[in-house]
């Protein structure tokens, strides 16, 4: 990323997942052209995906301690809000997904600034950003989110692409936000990212049944470790009514051959546009237009 837009740690750049993504997208070694290449790739894939009206691009805040100090040594990925604000201004198919760490000394002011800039949600990844969603330090931030009617998209379940700072992955930890009036979207439906780590899918299902303002997104469900989520989602009308489409781009979506058959699986793998492939897999599994449009209602985009 260009200076001023954000940063990635050397550890992250050396990791196998990011080496694969750089190879797959022909990005080469990171330099001053990398941001422009990624922007052009995303815009072209959106234009080539008529199933999508728009996509939320997510900023990613740095790590902060409970005194509000930024911890650069623990910040392996950072993408500033202003960069995504400018992307949304340039491209009609891009929406601004803000990221504000609640421990920041200026957290409320930054949230207000992002709200004025058109943020449709706020993104957290607690186990990577060092956030405890039950910490009273978050409560004023929750009140501000509720005031501005901005949903909180919080990662739940496992995470392997970024280093973990804690193990707070249970969606039940987001109850203080729900109680304070925030619409919560549990990313990945609280599924595991490896076969050996805890899975919180049952907790996610329970919260879908008990809380009106609780939702989940389907991002990354097209990965082998998360395929098991489709059975409870597709078989439970209440849970299904709480699912919002998400892609987790640029992570590649992989079809489930046991559900779709080998022929359909290879057909879907032939689609090079991963945004489109992710949608086509979900359509083959039985997701309908209503399932794909639900996000517009939850994010209050209707008529926008």
Image (cartoon, rainbow, N blue to C red):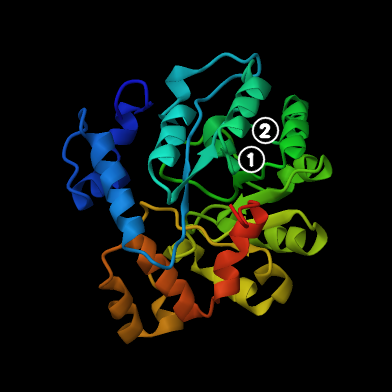
105 to 77, vertically: above or below: above
The answer to which of marks 2 and 1 sits earlier in the sequence is: 2
Please give the name of the residue rendered at 67% of the width and 41% of the height, measured from the top-left corner.
150
Instruction: Determine whether label 2 and label 1 are within 8 Å by CB.
Output: yes
User: Is residue 14 in view?
Assistant: no
Residue 132 picture location, percent across and down? 67, 33
Q: Residue farthest to the front? A: 303
Residues 91 and 208: in front is 91
Question: In the depicted view, which residue is nearer to us: 134 or 39?
Answer: 39
Residue that mark 2 sits on: 132
Q: Name the residue under label 1.
A: 168
Q: Is mark 2 on a helix, strand or loop?
A: loop
Task: Find residue 297 and report its image quarter.
Answer: bottom right
**x, y (%) of residue 36?**
25, 37
Give the spatial CA distance, label 2 vs label 1: 7 Å
Direction from residue 11 to residue 97 in the image, left or right: right
Secondary structure of the residue carrying tag 1 is loop
**Residue 76 position by quadrant:** top left
Nearest the camera: 111 or 270? 111
Residue at horizontal 21 percent and vertical 28 percent from the top: 32
As drawn, 67 above or below 157: above
What is the crowding at mark 1: few (fewer than 14 residues within 10 Å), some, or many (at least 20)?
many
Q: Do we see residue 167 in this rendering?
A: yes
Q: Which of 144 and 269 is in front in this view?
A: 144
Locate residue 208 relative to residue 230 in the image: left or right: right
Q: Position of residue 206 (x, y in %)?
A: 76, 62
Quarter in which the N terminus is drawn: top left
Residue 74 versus residue 224 in the image, above or below:
above
């Amino acid at each position: 990323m260009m200076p001023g837009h954000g940063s990635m740690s050397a550890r992250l750049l050396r990791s196998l997942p990011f080496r694969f993504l750089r190879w797959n997208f022909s990005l080469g070694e990171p330099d001053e052209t990398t941001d422009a290449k990624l922007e052009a790739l995303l815009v072209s894939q959106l234009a080539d995906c008529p199933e999508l009206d728009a996509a939320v691009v997510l900023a990613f805040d740095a790590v902060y301690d409970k005194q509000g100090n930024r911890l650069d040594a623990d910040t392996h990925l950072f993408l500033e809000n202003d960069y995504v604000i400018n992307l949304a201004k340039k491209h009609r198919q891009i929406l601004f997904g803000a990221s504000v760490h609640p421990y920041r000394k200026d957290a409320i002011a930054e949230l207000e600034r992002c709200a004025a800039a058109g943020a449709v949600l706020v993104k957290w990844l607690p186990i990577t950003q060092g956030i405890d969603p039950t910490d009273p330090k978050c409560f004023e931030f929750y009140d501000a989110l509720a005031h501005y009617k901005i949903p909180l998209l919080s990662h739940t379940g496992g995470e392997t692409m970024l280093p973990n700072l804690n193990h707070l992955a249970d969606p039940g930890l987001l109850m203080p936000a729900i109680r304070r009036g925030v619409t919560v979207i549990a990313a990945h439906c609280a599924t595991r990212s490896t076969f050996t780590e805890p899975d919180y899918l049952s907790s996610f299902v329970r919260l879908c049944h008990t809380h009106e303002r609780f939702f989940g997104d389907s991002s990354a469900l097209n990965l082998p470790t998360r395929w098991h989520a489709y059975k409870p989602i597709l078989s439970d009308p209440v849970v299904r009514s709480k699912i919002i489409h998400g892609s987790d781009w640029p992570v590649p979506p992989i079809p489930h051959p046991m559900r779709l058959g080998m022929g359909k699986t290879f057909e879907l793998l032939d689609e090079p546009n991963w945004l489109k492939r992710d949608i086509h897999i979900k359509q083959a599994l039985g997701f309908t237009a209503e399932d794909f449009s639900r996000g517009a209602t939850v994010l209050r985009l209707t008529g926008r």
